[in-house]
Amino acid sequence: MARQNDPDSATCQFFINHRDNGPLDYVENIRPGYTVFGKVTEGMDIVDAIASVVTTTRMGYNDVPVEPVVIQSARAVSE
């Protein structure tokens, strides 16, 4: 889950990691990390398309999509 500096501040935004993203990992007494709560089980072509959108720097943040990326539906799948 995306959050502010407070590890318990996540609300509604989330990351889809397209590759290993070590800076988001938990490191005891150093970095609280981010919660992982799922995985892509199908539709990886959509994740690839999201990863390839044009980005810019906005309000000090890098890699912000120029046009908003909106996920119109998702569903939980039991394994």
Image (cartoon, rainbow, N blue to C red):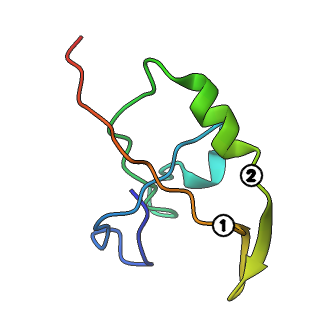
**Residue 77 relative to residue 2: left or right:** left
Q: In this view, does 11 lie above or below 44?
A: below
Q: Is residue 40 above or below residue 33?
A: above
Residue 53, label in figure: 2
Residue 16: give x, y in percent of width and height.
Answer: 52, 43
Q: Tell me which corner region of the image, top left, top right, bottom left or bottom right, holds residue 22.
A: top right
> In the rendered image, is residue 19 in sight?
no
**Looking at the picture, which amino acid does disc 2 mark?**
Val
Residue 4, label in figure: none
Residue corresponding to mark 1: 67
**Looking at the picture, which amino acid does disc 1 mark?**
Glu
Report crowding for label 2: few under 14, some 14 to 19, many 20 or more residues within 10 A (C-alpha).
some
Residue 20: give x, y in percent of width and height.
Answer: 66, 36
Q: Tell me which corner region of the image, top left, top right, bottom left or bottom right, holds residue 55.
A: bottom right
Disc 2 + disc 1, Cβ < 8 Å: yes
Residue 39: give x, y in percent of width and height.
Answer: 42, 28
Q: How far apart, in angstroms, are the residues tagged by discs 2 and 1?
A: 8 Å
Residue ID at (50%, 62%): 31
